[in-house]
């Protein structure tokens, strides 16, 4: 009686060993580190590590070691957060043009662990330190900009089709187009319904004036707002990447807000500079007649300018700009109708469309380039004082051949994949923010405060665990010691599952762990009290063990399922910290049921199963 079959014991042992194996990486310390990547046109080599080491030695920054990562990256391991900041400053001052730095924390794992894909749990912003910013997007301004574009496009289209109109004005979210007579209004209605299908068109005639009313339907307004929010997220992500922070988190919150979390970053002023930076696009013709080599040597032809593509290849472009990024009203990814290859479709406003049509008509068969322009601000320490400098970055994003004249809407082909086409469309839209932004909340958590949170969280878990261990050992004797053992196993399994899922541990997550300790031991208390009750009514020790587990099972399931439902609701409707608590609590509930019911029963079976017992140490 009270024996598990061999396969069941082996299965439980396998789960325990797997949990210990997956949780093992969390025993290793987290080193303050600097991730080094090469800028465009450069390459990370063994010589790069030598240069970085020399720069740190000159700055008197103690170095632990330099590791080589996949993807052509270097990881500079240091000893303290202070050395990490000094090391980043030294590397940027010495090698800033060829390398980019990102602050991060990296566990000092053996090579074989990394080879098999073992990684410790990721630490959240409150444990790791960094910057948390909440940004509000002005959706009303996004609608205003959309309506202003429609006004310009409608005027251009009516003039192009030679419609007799008097004016195009705006009244709130509606546009009013006035005509000289009924025939002109009817012609204008046909033009608008053909070219602007997204608008709701109505005819009216008041005080002898012939008018058309055009408005944006609710669905179109929502699409404009969603587009503005998506474009701003893309723009902010591109800008934050230039800040040099590993694993940034930029996510949508509600209908108009964006949450930016930068683990490891400690300079909110620099963050604001990046978020407020300006960026734009320019379309230029390629100079196919001039000499690129002469331009590289400093002798560009008259009317041309030397640029570089993203892979570092030089290219000669005409100085005359065709259109700029602020004239792009939309960009989307799709497929070419004839060849079926990935393509990017771009829409221009009225002025840009006319300019593009004139230029492309005169230059069919010639290449045209897209230039990405951004003003990047950097801060360097000079004599202990921060000195800011701004430099203009210009790089050729893509080059395509003009197949035929085009104007307001055109496409760019020659892309390698649909994913590249999607990213290209986002980049074309992310040259500038689609709507103004405002920082409504800002929090900075220092590395020392993050370490304090870790220490306090570990202390709370340790104290809670020790108190439970003492109580269970005194009150339930040997059975209590078994409960303590499975309680420790439960914590190991929670850590293993969090690491396996790639979840991020936060302070609310630690709170969920502490609560799980109480929930896990509660199941054992129900089982042991039921066993005591069976012994008191005269059942044999073996029968009491079996009855205790069987009769307590329904109560344990009911208690855990109701708590699990609450945790799922917290995860469904809560925000980031609440979700972190819910995830940890959910995992803890599942593992506690397994350890309290199955693992403790297996341990008791191994100790007392199949034996003649006069009493139980419970």
Image (spheres, rainbow, N blue to C red):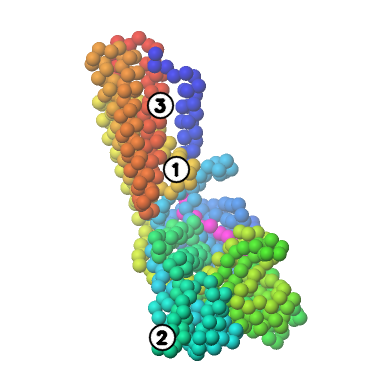
Relative to 30, 479 lies left or right = left
- Image x and y of residue 551, in percent: 31, 23
Q: Nearer the viewer, residue 149 or 412?
A: 149
Quadrant position of the N terminus in the picture: top left
- Quarter where residue 134 is shown: bottom left
The answer for how far apart the CA atoms under marks 3 and 2 are is 82 Å
- Quarter where residue 604 is shown: top left
Secondary element at image label 2: strand
How many residues crowd around disc 3 within 10 Å: few (fewer than 14), some, or many (20 or more)? some
Relative to 400, 384 lies left or right = left
Does the image show residue 618? Answer: no
Secondary element at image label 1: helix
Dominant SS of magenta comes to strand
Q: Nearer the viewer, mark 1 or mark 2?
A: 2
- Image x and y of residue 608, in percent: 37, 16
- The residue pinned by badge 2 equals 206
Residue 498 image label:
1
On screen, residue 307 above or below 338: below
Relative to 395, 326 lies left or right = left
Q: Is residue 9 magenta?
A: no
- The residue pinned by badge 3 equals 598
At x 26%, y 26%, the residue is 474
Q: Magenta residues, as a range? A: 30-40
Does the image show residue 158? Answer: yes
């Amino acid at each position: 009686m009270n024996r598990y079959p061999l396969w069941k014991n082996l299965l439980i042992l396998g789960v325990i060993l797997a949990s210990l194996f997956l949780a093992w990486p969390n025993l290793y310390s987290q080193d303050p580190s600097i991730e080094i990547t090469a800028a465009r046109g450069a390459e990370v080599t063994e010589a790069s590590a030598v240069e970085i080491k020399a720069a740190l030695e000159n700055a008197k920054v103690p170095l632990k070691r330099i590791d080589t990562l996949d993807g052509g990256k270097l990881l500079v391991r240091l000893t303290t957060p202070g050395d990490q900041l000094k090391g980043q400053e030294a590397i940027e001052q010495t090698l800033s043009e060829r390398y980019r730095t990102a602050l991060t924390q990296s566990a000092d794992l053996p090579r074989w662990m990394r080879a098999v894909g073992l990684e410790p749990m990721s630490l959240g912003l409150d444990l790791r330190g960094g910057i948390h910013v909440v940004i509000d997007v002005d959706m009303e301004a996004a609608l205003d900009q959309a309506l202003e574009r429609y006004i310009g496009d409608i005027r251009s289209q009516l003039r192009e089709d030679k419609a007799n109109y008097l004016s195009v004005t705006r009244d709130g979210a509606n546009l009013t187009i006035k005509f000289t007579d009924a025939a002109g209004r009817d012609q204008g209605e046909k033009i608008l319904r053909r070219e602007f299908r997204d608008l709701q068109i109505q005819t009216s005639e008041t005080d002898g004036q012939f008018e058309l009313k055009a408005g944006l339907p609710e669905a179109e307004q929502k699409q404009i707002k969603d587009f503005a929010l998506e474009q701003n997220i893309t723009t902010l992500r591109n800008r934050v990447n230039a800040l040099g922070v590993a694993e940034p988190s930029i996510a949508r919150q509600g209908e108009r807000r964006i949450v930016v979390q930068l683990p490891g970053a400690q300079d909110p002023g620099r963050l604001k500079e990046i978020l407020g930076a300006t960026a734009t696009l320019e379309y230029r013709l390629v100079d196919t007649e001039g000499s690129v080599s002469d331009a590289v040597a400093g002798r560009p032809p008259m009317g041309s300018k030397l640029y570089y593509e993203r892979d570092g290849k030089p290219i000669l472009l005409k100085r005359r700009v065709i259109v700029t990024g602020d004239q792009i009203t939309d960009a989307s990814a799709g497929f070419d109708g004839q060849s079926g290859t990935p393509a990017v479709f771009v829409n221009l406003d009225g002025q840009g469309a006319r300019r593009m049509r004139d230029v492309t008509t005169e230059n069919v068969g010639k290449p045209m380039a897209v230039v990405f322009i951004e003003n990047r601000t950097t801060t360097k320490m000079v004599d202990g004082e921060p000195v800011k400098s701004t430099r203009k970055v210009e790089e050729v994003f893509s080059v395509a051949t003009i197949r035929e004249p085009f104007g307001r809407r055109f496409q760019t082909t020659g892309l390698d994949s649909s994913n590249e086409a999607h990213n290209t469309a986002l980049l074309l839209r992310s040259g500038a923010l689609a709507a103004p932004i405002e920082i409504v909340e800002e929090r900075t958590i220092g590395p020392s405060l993050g370490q304090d949170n870790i220490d306090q969280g570990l202390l709370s878990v340790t104290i809670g665990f020790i108190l439970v261990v003492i109580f269970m050992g005194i009150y339930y004797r040997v059975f209590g010691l078994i409960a303590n053992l499975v309680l420790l196993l439960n914590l190991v399994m929670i850590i293993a599952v969090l690491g396996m899922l790639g979840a991020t541990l936060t302070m609310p997550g630690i709170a969920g762990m502490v609560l799980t300790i109480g929930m896990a031991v509660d199941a054992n208390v129900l089982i042991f009290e039921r066993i005591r009750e069976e012994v008191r009514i005269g059942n044999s020790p073996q029968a009491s063990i079996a009855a205790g587990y069987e009769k307590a099972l329904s109560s344990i399931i009911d208690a855990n399922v109701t708590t699990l439902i609450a945790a799922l609701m917290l995860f469904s409707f809560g925000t980031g910290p609440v979700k972190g608590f819910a995830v940890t609590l959910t995992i803890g509930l599942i593992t506690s049921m397994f350890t309290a019911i199955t693992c403790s029963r297996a341990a008791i079976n191994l100790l007392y199963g199949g034996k003649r017992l006069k009493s139980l140490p419970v």
